[in-house]
Image: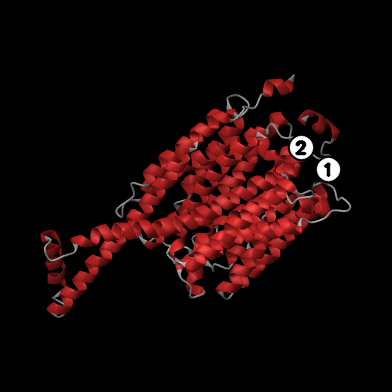
Amino acid sequence: MTEEIQKEWKPKHNPWIVSVPIIGASFMFVLDETIANVALLHMAGSFSASREEALWILTSYLIASGIIIPAVDWFCKLMGRKAFFTFSVLLFVCSSFLCGIANSLGMMIFARILQGLGGGALLPLAQAILLENFSVSQRGKAMALFGMVVVIAPIIGPVLGGWITDNFNWSWIFFINIPIGLFTIILIKYLLEDPPYARKQKNIRIDTLGFFLLTVWLVTLQIILDKGNNANWFQAAWVRRTAIVCVAAGILFFISQLKRKETLVDLSVFKDRNYSVGTLVQVVVNLVLLASMAILPQFLQSLMGYNAYLSGLTMMPRGAGSLTSVILSGVLSNKIDNRLLLCIGLIFIGIAGFQLSELNLDISMSSIAVPNFILGLGMGFSLVPSIALSAVTLNNNQMTNASGLQNLLKNIGGAIGTSLSGTMISRYSQMHQYSMVENLNSLNPIYQEHLKSIAGGLSQYTHPVSAEYMAENMLYNQLIQQSTLLGFVDTFRMFSIAAMIIIPTVFLLKNIDYKKEKQ
């Protein structure tokens, strides 16, 4: 069936040329998932917000893009895919300008929501277009190109964002999207075309109920994830009420999509085992990727004293690892079992996570670089074959809907990972602080020895009573620092375990049979 559809329609232009604006649009969207990470503390200071409040700048973008993703197929039918793609890029560019001029946290979150709504469609559309334009035998290389964007852009983001923040102003991390976006729109106009099944259709009705339920589900889920920790989770009445609404909206959304006609999404694609398992793997990998990208800069800035640029620079080895594995995946995809590549990638992610869980406050930059490089290898070897494997048994006319659903779930995974990482660090830090604070007592000879040593040094500059008080505060601050470090360490370890647990599911996938296609 796939081959028959390929013969019915072929792009006029060379697929590699058409991929230029597609990759450009995708690069902007993925870059903005992480470019704000290293500038988050700077933006929080500008808006007089806490770190937890500032996380909404990241998560509002993810959740807004998640809301629009399932409606991508519907909008393509309503406007035509090329027109909708152009509109999405334009909205992304305009909202990037609003982000750059934001002067309050509320305005920034509003602009990021618009940016997410504009950018949410870019990745599933890009994935669908690339898969359609290339033959099955070339999809490995096409997905390697796509993987370079999905994996490497988040690595470049913190470096670029840190350099811009330290040398100019955080506003420019959003302004740089404007020229890229405008150039992409021009290329889309002259290079992109709609296949018959992606052109504007008549009498298209929107699934209002489905869209409403989806929005309620995702928004309430994000509120719980972001604010639940501060409210002590289900001990707060409002969290329990919000959770009930969230679960009910999610269940009703899926029921409405299964039982009604002309729905927002077609859930029948989940009957395809390759698609379902491949999507699950991508969700876990995306969760680990975005969560680690969110917390590692915070660790380096808050505990190690790195500035925004240096904390972003430590991500470069991950980019080098990703580039290496993406290229190798493209070369090897037609030669060896793609499931083997996927297993190798997940193992690398697990190894890197365990290495990051051995961090301490006396490490050098190389101690960050090595696990980051290994994690980058894992990302490339995981995402490229998993995307190709999940699409191998689908028809071309299913690609837009399937890509939308897949990217929706990946975005939810990324949002959960970003929010969950903050909660895990906070909870693990509190747990370690509780277990360590009992050592700060007058009956502990080691504590008393350190206290007298520090107080003795300080008494040369102040009153002995003040010196002892200052020494107690210094030791308590060291305890807070160590407990926070252990919170980061435990979080990295949990993400590593998540990657390892998902490995057995790889063997449920059907491999790509290139020989059969050639025949």
**Colour convention:** secondary structure
Where residue 472 sits, quadrant-wise, is bottom left
Distance from the alpha carbon under mark 2 to that under mark 1 = 9 Å
Dot 2, crowdedness within 10 Å: few (<14), some or many (≥20)?
A: many
Tell which of 198 and 161 is nearer to you. 198
Which residue has dot 1 on it? 197
**What element does badge 1 sit on?**
helix
**Position in image of residue 176 (x %, y %):** 63, 61
Q: Amino acid at mark 1?
A: Tyr
Q: Residue at x 67, y 58 (%)?
A: 213
Whether residue 44 is situated above or below residue 379 in the rendered picture: below
Q: Residue at x 73, y 53 (%)?
A: 71
Quarter that holds the C terminus: top right
**Position in image of residue 242 (x %, y %):** 55, 63
Which residue has dot 2 on it? 396
Residue 148: numbered disc: none
Dot 1, crowdedness within 10 Å: few (<14), some or many (≥20)?
A: some
Tell which of 504 and 464 is nearer to you. 504
Q: Amino acid at mark 2?
A: Asn
**What element does badge 2 sit on?**
helix
**Position in image of residue 290 (x %, y %):** 52, 51
Residue 36 seen: no
Q: Residue at x 40, y 51 (%)?
A: 491
Q: Earlier in the sequence, mark 2 or mark 1?
A: 1
Q: Are marks 2 and 1 in contact (CB under 8 Å)?
A: yes
**Position in image of residue 495 (x %, y %):** 44, 46
Q: Residue at x 56, y 60 (%)?
A: 244
Q: Is residue 302 left or right of residue 468?
A: right
Whether residue 270 is situated above or below residue 42 in the rendered picture: above
